[in-house]
Image (spheres, rainbow, N blue to C red):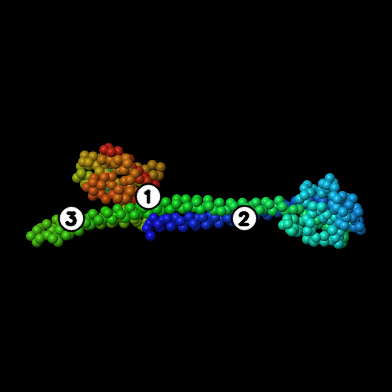
Amino acid sequence: MNSQQLFRRSRLRLAAWYALVMGGILGLLGSGMAHILVQANWAALEREIESSAGTLHDSLEPMLPPAQDPTGVLQQIFPDLCVVEQPCEPNPSLIQRHTLGISDRTTYYIRLFDNQGNLLAYSPNQPESLSSTLNPDTWQTLQTKDSQRYHQFTTILHGAAHTHALDEEPHKAPSWGYLQVGRTLAAFDAERQRLQWILIGGLPLALGLVAVSSWWLSGRAMQPIYQSYRQQQQFTANAAHELRSPLASLLATVEAILRLPPTQSEQVPTLLKTVERQGHRLSQLVTDLLLLTSLEQNTTAQPPQPCCLNDIVADLTEEFAELAATTQIHLNHQIPDIEIRIMGQESQLYRLVSNLMANAIQYTPPGGSVMVCLAAHDRIATIAVKDTGIGIPLEAQSHVFERFYRVNSDRSRKTGGMGLGLAIAKAIVQRHRGQLALDSEMGQGSVFTISLPS
Ligand code: ADP
């Protein structure tokens, strides 16, 4: 499987996981919300029925006739109810007066039972299939043959005579009968069905959106990984390329030594010197690569120590003095009287400043000058390496810190540079939580400024 396929498959897998998790969360949230809404509607509906029944109950009780043969009197106080075993001719204009608190008589129905549980009177709009014997359960949900659902509430009625007895000995008082108030669940069921349709229709749509956004999100998540993979690939290719040239030249020299006729044996030391030089170059390249890797992987386990930057700058200026003198460059430094210390790895800091100074000397023509300035301001220590050298073109300035990048291969190859010096410098600065800035003008010179928290 090539890398493109591998990344595509990983992206697909990541998108599938995203979609699964987000879809699951959305599904749970959606059905949870719908359930809560249905429950709230149901509770409101029961409250409404109960309060209507309560209003009716309180208004009826004082008017109730004695229990013996109540139908005649009932007919007078409920002219809009149908009395059992009598023709039902309700007078719609009166029904509102009696169905106190019940605003919509097409929604609600009322039934009255005697204390034996026999139906006495009922609203004409009650469901047809209702039984005429009492089921005393407080709450009941019924379904008619045509799938209409009703919810009803049953409460005990005490007549006027019984109400006095109830006040005196409530637990012994007999009841007059029962009042049943019910209402159709058509509106509730329609609302519940609407919610179900929203869920059924909306969820696949939401899942589709989740799938598309998951694909996009996984693409974004994979991007830095892909970029880093490409960089690694480029790095391996560059490293192999850099190793190939000195190796080829080393092998060619060794071959030349082996083929040398005994008469020319005096050339052997010169050729061996070339072999040694190539070997050193190879060894330097491998050491630099290992250092870069260890800096990036943070594998140097030594704890940070206080490092005196004054000493580092002074030591390195002294070290490079000879090289500067041979290349006719004026090398100077500016160090403050107070000691500037930072926490870090001393050997790495030496390497950092020495890389910048070596470059400054290398890329400055004879007669030029190199200056190293150390300063501290606001708990930030700065080391500026300034030269009056050839400068770096603007378009190359953002690339010079990349591994194996050379502004112009010819000019740095002449100086033996492999394009790793600034990459190492940048990695060391980053390990010390600092910054490395470049300011350069072609033909005028360059300034590399290291800023480190002290
Ligand atoms: P090298 O080992 O080739 O010098 P570096 O990573 O140190 O590699 O530098 C990268 C490139 O930046 C070099 O090819 C060089 O051309 C350019 N460069 C670095 N420092 C300077 C400088 N002080 N003046 C001009 N060019 C510079």
Residue type at mark 1 is Gln
Q: Which amino acid type corresponds to the residue marked 3 in the rendered image? A: Thr
Q: Position of residue 364 (x, y in %)?
A: 24, 42
How packed is label 2: few (under 14 Cα within 10 Å), some, or many (20 or more)? few
Q: Give the residue number, with chain letter if any, for mark 1.
A: 430
Mark number displayed over residue 32: 2
- Residue that mark 3 sits on: 274
Measure how far apart labels 1 and 2 are at the Cα level: 49 Å
Position of residue 45 relative to residue 137, above or below, is above
What residue is shown at x 82% (from left), y 52% (from top)?
Answer: 124
Q: Which residue appears at 53% of the width and 51% of the height?
A: 209
Q: Assess mark 3: CB under 8 A from ligand 1? A: no
Mark before the other along the chain sequence, 2 or 3: 2
Q: Quadrant of residue 9?
A: bottom left
Q: At 41% from the left edge and 53% from the top edge, which residue is drawn? A: 225
Taking depth in this image into account, of 400 and 33 the one nearest to the observer is 33
